[in-house]
Structures are given as structure tokens and as C-alpha cells.
Image: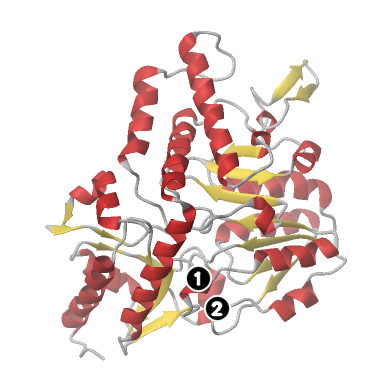
Amino acid sequence: MIETKTLRADFPIFERLVHGKPLVYLDSAATSQKPQVVIDALDDYYRRYNANIHRGIYTIAEEATQAYEGARQKVADFIRAPEAAEIIFTRNTTESINLVAYTWAQQNVRVGDEIVLTEMEHHSNLIPWILLAERTGAVLKHIPFDSDGYLDLDAARQMIGERTKLVSIVHASNVLGTINPVREIARLAHEHGALVLVDGAQSVPHFGVTVADLECDFLAFSSHKMLGPTGVGVLWSRREILEAMPPFLGGSEMIGQVYLDHATWNELPWKFEAGTENIADVIALGTAVDYLARIGMDNVRAHEIELTEYALERLGEEPDVHLYGPRDPQRKGGVIAFNLADLHSHDVASIVDRDGIAIRVGHHCCQPMMRKLEVPGTARASFYIYNTRDDVDRLIEGLDHVRQVFGIARG
């Protein structure tokens, strides 16, 4: 198990006060905090071996290349990808999904073909497919979720059929926390010859996710949600799929041979990494992966289950708190969406911020979901390895402060 109070010392941000009070950070679904070793990795690169990668034959360039490609291997090992060449570095999960939409999908999807999504997708897994449908005439379908926040698998079985080209599905909802049965849906899709993309932005940082267990064809996730820096995303796919896909961006590094009127493309993974990459942040992502691996992803998951269970219990005791999504901590990630009485979520967040408590509010880039829930937005508390029961207790106290400000009797 995680000794959270000891571990928190690794994160310099928790040394600061907000409005004179210790910071309670409950927004890791948006971005995670960074341990000192990750910050040090960035500093070390720029201080000791700042150089461009792959082409330099001098010492610090070779050191930079080794560190960058070493991070790729660490990421491959983390999700148990068969080979490091199947790991493509992008800017974020959004760009990873767009890469698939503008390469594989543009090449393979035609008029009348179907893309199956869900009603709980983040905009990053909706907009690329809306744009694709506009370009190609493809048809979008959406698996509904029920009042408990679970996908309707009977509806999924009816939707996924012979016209389905791709099923693109979130592994864990950034609002409801629902952990979706990706493998079951992937098997259904594969029976009909469709490929499967998994948005792992909220799962890879929190569970022991492996590509073999998911049985997916594409997996996208982000560095900054798993203790790493912003500006780095990951796309994984099988070699044979990536080799058949056209390049996404053109420029240096992604080329084999260039002539005035034509060119050939580089080998994997560099075919999809045009121009100078985000070298320092990729290297620091490798350090973040090392940090999580030392803790153990089973321990990360166990800690979040325990904390989510406690938070659901405490919030469930508040009669004027409305909770959204599954109540079973075994079937959801460390994310809890809620509203307090009939107050706007922005007001709730502004007031608890005075107590040093950081929560997310709004539609969480899930406007279609909010329409289905019939709310303009929700407050959201999300947990990670550095959170404790004390943080949950502080949130409950913060909600009491909100009631006082608005003159609302508790319950």
C-alpha cells in the first residue's frame, strides 16, 4: 500500500499555502502534480545535455538521443507494448486521436461507414470523428449510458455491425468515473472486422493497463495526467497498422529520402514524429513512468479505490449533495462528480478555493453528457497517489462553508 503522507514530501507544490491554508488538490483528472524527480529530470536535461536528437554524433547529442529513446522503451514496458517502435509521441491524447482520424480513418472510412462512440466521450474523442464524418460521409453512432452511469451493452451489440469501421471508446470517464468494459466491446467490434481505439487518458495513469488486456488496436494517453510534464502524448498501435498508415505531419525526421517532387518515409516510430520533438518533456515522462513503476500500479489502484470509497461515503451522507455516476468504487476511477443543492458549480468551486481546496467545475469537455444529465455542469473531485482521507474531510468542511455563505441549512 501507499504511505501517502510520506509520498507527499516528493511533491514540492504541497509545501505552499493557498489563501493561507494548505493546498488540497482534487483535480488530478485535469492534470497531475509533479514529483521532484520529474522536475529534476527537466532541469538536468537543459543543464547538462541539451542537444537535438538522432542526428548529432557528439557526446551530448548521443546522450539526449539515448535518454529520449530510453523513455520510449519505458513507456512501451509500462503498457506492455510488444516493441518500442509502436510508441508514437504526440502532444497529448487529443493529438493522438486526431492522428488516427487523419491517417488511418481518412484512408479507410468511406461514405456510409460507421464510427461507434459513446455518450460519455470527452470532446477530444468526439470532435475528430465529427470532422471525419463531415469529410467522408461516415455515420456516427453513440452507445448510451444508463442512470447509474454504465454503458448499455445491449445497445452496443445492436449498434456494432458490418458497417462499423471503428469503435472509439473512453476507458474511464473523466466525469462519471465509469470504467468501461473495453475488452468485451473490443471483442464484439473485432467479430465484425472493426478496429478499436481506447482513450486511456484517465486509465493508464491509474490502473495497470496493458494493450494485451484491452485487446484494442489503438491506445491514446497523456504524460501530464501521470506525473509527467505537459506537451507529451502517446499513441500506441500494432506495427502492421502503423506501417500501413500514411504520415500525419510532413517535415524533417519523418522522411527516408527526399527529392524535389517526391519523398519516402522513415521507419517506425519516426514516420509519425515530424520535426524536433519535445525532447526534455519526453525524457521527464520516462522519469514519471519510473516513479509510478516503483510504487506499483496495483498499489495506485488500491489506494484510489479506498479513497473513492471513503469520499462516496462522506458525500453520500450529505442530503443536499447530488452524486453522478457509479457508486461502486470497484467499477469507477478516482473521480466523483457532484452538485450541491441548486447552486452553480462555479460558485461552489470559488468558495472552497478560499479554503485552499482545488476542484474542477463546468461541463468537463463533455457537453453532450451534461445535456443528458440535464445540468449545466458539475463540480468534480478527482484523486491520485498524493491524496488522503484528510483531503476528503477538508472538502466536506469546504462544502459547509459554501452553505454558510449562501445561507443554506445543512441538509
Place of residue 319 in the rendered image (x, y in percent of width and height, measured from the top left) = 32, 90
Residue 56's label in the rendered image is none
Q: What residue type is labelled 1?
A: Lys
Asked which colour scheme the image uses, the reply is: secondary structure
Mark 1 / mark 2, whichever is N-terminal: 2
Q: In the rendered structure, are the residues bearing label 1 and label 2 in contact, judged by CB atoms less than 8 Å apart?
A: yes
Place of residue 98 in the rendered image (x, y in percent of width and height, measured from the top left) = 64, 48
Query: For the C terminus, which image quadrant?
Result: bottom left
Is residue 1 visible in the rendered image? The answer is yes
Residue drawn 63% across the image and 38% down it:
88
Place of residue 394 in the rendered image (x, y in percent of width and height, measured from the top left) = 22, 70
Q: Is residue 70 above or below residue 334?
A: above
Q: Name the one closer to the observer, 279 or 94.
A: 279
Q: Is residue 297 above or below residue 275?
A: below
For disc 1, the marked residue is 332
Asked whether, in this view, residue 202 is left or right of residue 105, the answer is left
Outermost residue to the right: 162
Question: Of helix, strand and loop, which one carries label 1?
Answer: loop
Q: Which label sits in the foreground, 1 or 2?
A: 1
The answer to which image quadrant residue 288 occupies is: top left
**Mark 1 burial class by Cα count in 10 Å: few <14, some 14-19, many 20+:** many
Place of residue 263 in the rendered image (x, y in percent of width and height, measured from the top left) = 78, 22
Is residue 380 visible in the rendered image? The answer is no
The answer to which image quadrant residue 132 occupies is: bottom right
Residue 149's label in the rendered image is 2
Residue drawn 37% across the image and 23% down it:
46
Q: What residue type is labelled 2?
A: Gly
